[in-house]
Image (tube, coloured by chain):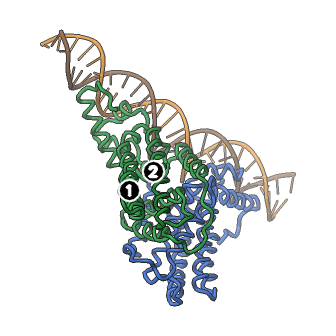
Chain colours: A blue, B green, C orange, D brown
Amino acid sequence: MNSPCLRSDAERNRARIIAAARTVFARDGLGASMASVAREAEVGIATLFRRFPTKEELVAAVFADRMDAYARAVAVALEDPDPWHGLVGYIETVCEMQAADSGFADVLTMTFPAAKCLEDRRREGYEGIVRLIDRAKAAGSLREDFTPEDLVLVYMANAGVVNATGDAAPDSWRRVVALLIESFRAPGRGPLPDAPEPRAIYRAMLRAGQACRGAQER
Amino acid sequence: MNSPCLRSDAERNRARIIAAARTVFARDGLGASMASVAREAEVGIATLFRRFPTKEELVAAVFADRMDAYARAVAVALEDPDPWHGLVGYIETVCEMQAADSGFADVLTMTFPAAKCLEDRRREGYEGIVRLIDRAKAAGSLREDFTPEDLVLVYMANAGVVNATGDAAPDSWRRVVALLIESFRAPGRGPLPDAPEPRAIYRAMLRAGQACRGAQER
DNA sequence: ACCGAAGTGGATAAGCCTTTCCGGTTGGTA
DNA sequence: TACCAACCGGAAAGGCTTATCCACTTCGGT
């Protein structure tokens, strides 16, 4: 993955940049400017762009491991002997990741055009979710009308809460997520409005990403 | 409210601007540029800024009646003989307003620095909410640990869903809101994480507004 | 019909943003 | 030590944004 033949100073700067970007994106979200990342890394702006020719590539490099963790979280949840406990833990884990890292929340809900590799991880996570949900339904813990798209909606809702409350009320998301989880438990108390179609949700996220590209980039 | 002595053409342009801004802000949120509003109104950019010296003033003028409707919705809900039915209707009304108008969602969750008069309406709404909640609790329909801040969190969550799904899955919000409402019903199924303090939520929203003034939004 | 105040719109300022260019500096090999 | 490709950082290009300036036009009272 890493370029094999970087000069030692270049390799050091590359690491500084990644670390700085991790800090800045976590704090300010993907809306943070490249200049602010360079400043945090104590590196010239050109150095940053030589190593990562576009902001998108920097984002991909920074969030590769976060998206790995995201994909792994499903596997962990699937190993839980209690399907309901596994599902709840999974939701809380992902939402906590969103709360702890604004940039990750942006990547997950595609507020920013995501690179291919991150995209793959997200789909991987989605496929795990499907199994997680089936398992919980089979155990009778999860309401029958629950769909994988509902989980995506939870991420979007949580992103809204995390964004709006910031670090002035940093644990607010836990309450909203807890309320939502309560409502997922079988049996449902009544019929729900239709779930969005998977295609529609995916298209919506794509569109948001593109719109953002148009607005922020060039 | 309106300036009393505007020349007829100026008055006409003012109306065109307001109408255009309503359309554009509803579609694109408050992140839409002043230039795009001027274009939609078929008016020069200078004309727009002469009538509304800052974007904030335009927003205030455009959303005055939406915020009136928002404040009125509480009154309507309080007149409902069934407290629970009134509360649910209120939540659905406000969330539908968010879904129908991105700009309104931004104003409500203060993604944008709000003008004084809109601010007043929002506080007015908040005070009504408090009574609405007390009434529903007294009737035994609403869980005892529910707080007014929970309703604010609902708006934030809903804004996240509406923002992310856009018009590719325009009814997704109904499902999330329905799930949340289910979880509000008394008795709660278990203890919840602490609600955020009113002050904290308010400060969080203010901070978000200031940050947005500095940055861009959407 | 005239005339001044009021109104108009395009050019422009000033400030962000991402990305590129270029002259000076340095790592590491011979 | 001496060399040069690789690397560096700041300046600048070109794109957005909000907001202002100024030469020209139009309304509306006389």
Asked if marks 2 and 1 touch (Cβ < 8 Å), the reply is: yes
> Where residue C25 sits: x, y (%)?
76, 47
Q: Which residue: 36% across, 52% down? A: B26
Residue A50 visible in the snapshot: no
Quadrant housing residue A27: bottom right
Identify the residue at horizontal 62%, vertical 62% (top origin).
Answer: B194
Task: Give the chain letter at badge 1.
Answer: B
Q: Residue D4: horizontal and vertical position, in percent?
A: 71, 56
For label 1, the SS is helix
Q: Which residue is mark 1?
A: B77
**Residue B128, numbered label:** 2
Secondary structure state at the residue bearing disc 2: helix
* Disc 2 and disc 1 on one polypeptide chain: yes
Q: Is residue B63 left or right of residue A178?
A: left
Query: Relative to A192, does residue C29 appear above or below in the rendering?
Result: above
Callout 1, which amino acid?
Ala
Report the disc number at residue A167: none
Identify which residue, B52 or A83, lies in the foreground. A83
Which kind of residue does numbered mark 2 sit on?
Gly
> Looking at the image, is mark 2 or mark 1 earlier in the sequence?
1
Q: Chain of mark 2?
A: B
Residue at (58, 47) in percent of width and height: B207
Horizontal and vertical percent position of residue C7 = 29, 27
> At 67% across and 69% down in the image, what residue appears?
A2
With respect to residue A62, does B199 lie above or below? above
